[in-house]
């Protein structure tokens, strides 16, 4: 209880410093909000930013990524931005420390925020916020899309047609096909929102589900806790999940403890007929080891919506492996998902604008 009280006091003290810093900046004017890489989100110019525009002097820099640190700092200085918005774009600590004092809020237009300088922002009393649940259904459906395609060898069939090979239409069928019902779906780190949604769809398709979690049971009240077709194993015993699953889907957050932790040792425990699916973060996989395992055909195939670097280097072997199927991080790119993200970003900004030194008014603060 004493430790908990100390943590609470520290958090409250930090929040008060953050909001004290913000309130002085908010008096009597509309803040400038700069979206540093707007084209990453609004690549088709179909999104409606009117809600953000109603709150701010909204400026957008239409590029997918700003890599040059001098350019990044120059853009923020040029607009004297108070709110800096990014989408999956690294903002190195070196660049952030050169941002002008006008910057009072960093907004990640997405869920993961490992691309932002969390500690440096805390030291400057600059809140960092994210959008934690905007793509739960969409990313879960992306994992299921890979699963369903693998079950009927759809990718391989389409490749044959692109090569003008119509053998499966004119002669004996040559590709493996299997029903989904009765198969086992293993979810590594799957007790969170996205993993839970994948499990629910898998259960609706008649699958059995194994979830690896830090604890041997799901939290009280979890949506899957009483389902007889769901079993849980601890992260230390993930080998049970790997050896029994027909499809292994990764839902692990990326942090210092998980980076590069899924590699040869884990893949070697999977069935040779099993498929690996990753819609979480590419860097949780040891990509070099993954490539080696796929070249050795250790498992049947891998579907990767994420890679360690996006896109992979042009000379990466991932592009040409016949049993690896890539998509350009499309889990979050559906039009409805992206518009929801704009709305949630607007809600974060609105809460900031209305905070006026009331720390409880801010939402989705991660630092």
Image (cartoon, grey):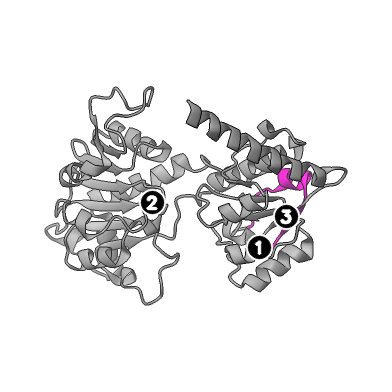
Q: Is residue 59 magenta?
A: yes
Residue for badge 1: 97
199 relative to 336 in the view: left or right: left
- Crowding around mark 2 (Cα neighbors within 10 Å: few <14, some 14 to 19, many 20+) is many
| Magenta span | 45-61
Number of numbered discs present? 3
Q: Along the polypeptide, which appears first: circle 1 or circle 2?
A: 1
Q: Nearer the viewer, residue 61 or 71?
A: 71
Kindly state the secondary structure of the residue where label 1 is placed: loop
Residue 103 is tagged as: 3
- On the image, the x and y values in percent for residue 87 come to 57, 56
- Disc 1, disc 3: CB below 8 Å? no
- Residue at the extreme bottom: 315
Residue 305 is tagged as: none
- Crowding around mark 1 (Cα neighbors within 10 Å: few <14, some 14 to 19, many 20+) is some
Who's the residue at 28% across and 32% down the image?
Answer: 203
Who's the residue at 55% across and 44% down the image?
Answer: 336
- Establish if 181 lies above or below 25: above
- Residue at the extreme front: 2
- On the image, the x and y values in percent for residue 175 come to 17, 57
The answer to whether residue 115 is seen in the rendering is yes
- Establish if 302 lies above or below 317: above
Residue for badge 2: 279
């Amino acid at each position: 209880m004493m430790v908990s009280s100390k943590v609470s006091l520290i958090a409250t003290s930090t929040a008060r410093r953050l909001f004290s810093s913000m309130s002085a900046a908010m008096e009597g004017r509309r803040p400038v909000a700069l979206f540093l890489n707007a084209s990453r989100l609004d690549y088709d110019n179909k999104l409606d930013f009117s809600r953000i525009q109603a709150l701010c002097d909204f400026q957008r820099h239409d590029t997918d990524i700003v890599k040059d640190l001098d350019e990044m700092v120059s853009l923020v200085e040029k607009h004297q931005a108070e709110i800096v918005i990014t989408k999956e774009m690294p903002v190195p600590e070196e660049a952030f420390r050169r941002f002008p004092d006008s910057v009072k809020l960093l907004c990640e237009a997405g869920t993961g925020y490992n691309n932002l300088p969390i500690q440096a922002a805390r030291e400057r009393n600059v809140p960092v916020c994210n959008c934690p649940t905007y793509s739960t259904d969409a990313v879960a459906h992306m994992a299921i899309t890979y699963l369903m395609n693998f079950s009927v060898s759809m990718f391989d069939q389409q490749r044959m047609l692109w090569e003008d090979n119509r053998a499966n239409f004119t002669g004996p069928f040559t590709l493996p096909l299997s029903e989904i019902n009765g198969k086992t779906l293993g979810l590594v780190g799957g007790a969170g929102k996205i993993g839970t949604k994948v499990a629910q769809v898998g259960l609706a398709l008649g699958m059995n589900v194994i979830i690896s979690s830090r604890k041997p049971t799901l939290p009280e009240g979890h949506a899957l806790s009483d389902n007889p077709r769901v079993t849980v194993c601890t992260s230390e015993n993930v080998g049970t999940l790997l050896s029994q699953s027909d499809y292994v889907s990764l839902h692990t957050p990326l942090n210092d403890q998980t980076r590069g932790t899924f590699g040869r040792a884990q893949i070697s425990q999977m069935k040779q007929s099993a498929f690996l699916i990753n819609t979480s973060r590419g860097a949780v996989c040891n990509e070099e080891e993954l490539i080696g395992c796929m070249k050795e055909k250790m498992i049947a195939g891998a579907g990767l919506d994420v890679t360690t670097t996006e896109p992979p280097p042009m000379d990466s072997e991932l592009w040409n492996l016949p049993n690896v199927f890539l998509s350009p991080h499309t889990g979050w790119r559906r039009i409805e998902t992206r518009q929801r993200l704009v709305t949630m970003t607007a809600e974060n900004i609105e809460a900031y604008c209305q905070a006026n030194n009331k720390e409880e008014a801010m939402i989705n603060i991660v630092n």
